[in-house]
């Protein structure tokens, strides 16, 4: 059973960089079983897939967020992280980290096998 836990500030000022970390237990982030995604849900809206870091460390991002998003990992801590730069109030959302053996871009939950509980990040001055 894979468990994921998001951590990071709950409040970020506009124009700053949002930084979140996902701590994984129950499996290694270098295993080929899963790739590791960040997904967000703005208030009153649907889920939005942001990007993924694969078991080999390669990354891929949503085209709409690619210019502002970076995902990295610390294999010694079994963690992966999200950075979203130049945030605006429209980036206010619950941010989830998730694990999946593949990404179903057409599915309601992107085909993820495991999810963190999510953390609310508010962008406000």
Image (cartoon, helix red, strand yellow):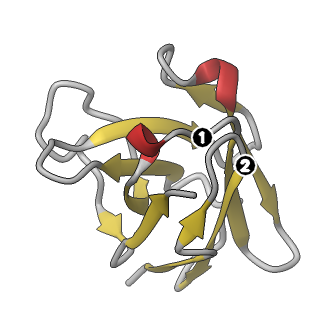
Q: Is residue 9 left or right of residue 1?
A: right
Res 17 label: 2
- Can you tell which quarter of the image residue 106 is in? top left
Q: Nearer the viewer, residue 92 or 112?
A: 92
From the viewer's perspective, is residue 31 above or below residue 22?
above
Tell me the element at label 2: loop
- The residue at the far right in this view is 76
Q: Could you tell me which residue is drawn at 70 percent across and 38 percent down?
A: 85
Q: Could you tell me which residue is drawn at 74 percent across and 43 percent down?
A: 56
Residue 64 % position (x, y): 47, 16
Name the residue that disc number 1 marks.
Answer: 87
Q: Marks 1 and 2, Cα distance to the nearest angstrom?
A: 6 Å
Q: Is residue 120 left or right of residue 52?
A: left
Q: Could you tell me which residue is drawn at 59 percent across and 52 percent down?
A: 32
Q: Is residue 100 left or right of residue 13?
A: left
Residue 47 % position (x, y): 23, 44
Q: Nearer the viewer, residue 31 or 67?
A: 67
Q: Could you tell me which residue is drawn at 71 percent across and 71 percent down?
A: 79
- The residue at the far top in this view is 63
Q: Nearer the viewer, residue 69 or 43?
A: 43
Q: Which quarter of the figure is the N terminus placed in?
A: bottom left
Q: Which quarter of the figure is the C terminus placed in?
A: bottom right
From the viewer's perspective, is residue 12 above or below residue 39?
below
Res 14 label: none
Residue 118 % position (x, y): 37, 72
Residues at badges 1 and 2 in contact (C-beta under 8 Å)? yes
Residue 19 % position (x, y): 69, 59
Label 1, residues with CA under 10 Å away: few <14, some 14-19, many ≥20: some
């Amino acid at each position: 059973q894979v468990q994921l836990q998001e951590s990071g500030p709950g409040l970020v000022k506009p124009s700053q960089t949002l930084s979140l970390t996902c701590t994984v237990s129950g499996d290694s982030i270098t295993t080929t079983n899963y790739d590791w995604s960040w997904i967000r849900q703005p208030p009153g809206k649907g889920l939005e897939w942001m990007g993924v870091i694969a078991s080999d460390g390669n990354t891929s991002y949503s085209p709409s967020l690619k210019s502002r998003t970076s995902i990295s990992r610390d294999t010694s801590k079994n963690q992966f992280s999200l950075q979203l730069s130049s945030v605006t109030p429209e980036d206010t959302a619950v941010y989830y980290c998730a694990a999946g053996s593949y990404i179903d871009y057409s599915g309601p939950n992107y085909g993820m096998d495991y999810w963190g509980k999510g953390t609310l990040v508010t962008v406000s001055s």
